[in-house]
């Protein structure tokens, strides 16, 4: 019987696979990247992670065009705008997607560390760790790869974003990495896609309601996230998710 791969072996394999896919397909059209991942590289072992935010419809529409049964993981932090939750259900129905998986924070962790729901006021990183990073690690754990809708133009922290990247023993795929705001707008209009209603009020990047505000003119799309706190990412797209996956038994 072959020995079970050690974690370091699995991580090295994921890094090699992501590098190979990036070299071969990283510059391809977004829908080609999606088809390659869904049909060939990760068939039956891939999901999409979606916030159902400002431009989530673009990636989800492309995925639906390839395979409507691809699981879509939505992280319900308990702090979403009501508009986002309504939009999630409406867009999912519009696109004919069939497998919505909602993950939530652990109740025990909330009761222990955020019983009054105000942790974000004193320690925003700890709030994100409980409400976003840990539950998302559980959400993606069953899969070998997952899609995100991240783009390079969104923030300085994403300017070098590849289409394929290794996260521990898994591969994260960003088919829209090279897209611009104009590309997204053109695609939304061309396909008549439903828009999150908060966009009309200037919310260009939409997260939890206590830590999200409308973007100011001339600022990047994520300027309204954790405004004034020197924070640009919740941790899901940084090393925090990797650590949660490695430190869990998932």
Image: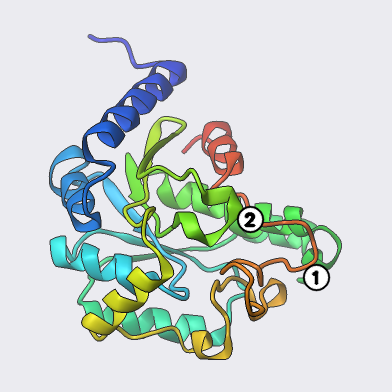
Q: Position of residue 47 (x, y in %)?
A: 31, 53
Secondary element under disc 1, as helix, strand or loop, is loop
Q: Is residue 152 at all visible to an observer of this figure? A: yes
Does 165 sit above or below residue 134? above
| Frontmost residue, 114 versus 173 | 173
- Looking at the image, residue 124 sits to the left or right of residue 10; the answer is right
Q: Residues within 10 Å of mark 2 (few under 14, many from 20)?
A: many
Query: Which is nearer the N-term, disc 2 or disc 1?
Result: 1
Q: Position of residue 234 (x, y in %)?
A: 63, 55
Does 94 sit above or below residue 239? below
- Looking at the image, residue 6 sits to the left or right of residue 130; the answer is left
Secondary element under disc 2, as helix, strand or loop, is loop
Q: Position of residue 150 (x, y in %)?
A: 44, 57
Q: Which dot marks residue 160? A: none
Most extreme residue toward the right, as rendered? Answer: 122
Q: Position of residue 11 (x, y in %)?
A: 42, 24
| Frontmost residue, 156 versus 173 | 156
Q: Quadrant of residue 226?
A: bottom right
User: What residue do we see at 40% from left, 42% from top?
Assistant: 162
Which quarter of the image is occupied by the N terminus?
A: top left
| Frontmost residue, 201 versus 63 | 201
User: What residue do we see at 51% from left, 48% from top?
Assistant: 159
Discs 2/1, front = 2
Q: Which residue is mark 1?
A: 118
Q: Which residue is mark 2?
A: 234
């Amino acid at each position: 019987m072959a020995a079970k791969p050690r974690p370091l072996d699995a991580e090295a394999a994921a890094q090699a696979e992501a590098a190979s896919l990036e070299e071969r397909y990283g510059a391809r059209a977004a829908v080609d990247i999606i088809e390659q991942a869904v049909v060939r590289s990760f068939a039956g072992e891939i999901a999409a992670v979606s916030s159902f935010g400002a431009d989530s419809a673009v990636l989800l529409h492309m995925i639906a065009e390839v395979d409507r049964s691809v699981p879509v993981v939505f992280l319900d932090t308990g702090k979403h705008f009501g508009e986002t939750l309504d939009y999630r259900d409406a867009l999912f129905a519009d696109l004919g997607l069939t497998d919505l998986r909602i993950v939530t924070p652990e109740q025990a962790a909330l009761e222990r560390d955020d019983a009054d729901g105000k942790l974000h006021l004193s320690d925003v990183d700890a709030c994100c760790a409980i409400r976003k990073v840990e539950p998302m690690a559980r959400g993606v754990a069953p899969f070998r790869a997952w899609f995100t809708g991240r783009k390079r133009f969104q923030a300085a922290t994403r300017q070098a974003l590849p289409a394929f990247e290794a996260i521990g023993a898994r591969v994260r795929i960003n088919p829209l990495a090279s897209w611009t705001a104009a590309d997204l707008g053109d695609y939304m209009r061309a396909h008549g896609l439903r828009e999150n209603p908060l966009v009309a009020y200037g919310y260009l990047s939409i997260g939890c309601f206590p830590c999200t505000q409308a973007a100011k003119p001339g600022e990047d799309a994520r300027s309204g996230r954790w405004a004034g706190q020197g924070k640009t990412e919740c941790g899901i797209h940084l090393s925090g998710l990797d650590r949660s996956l490695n430190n869990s038994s998932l």
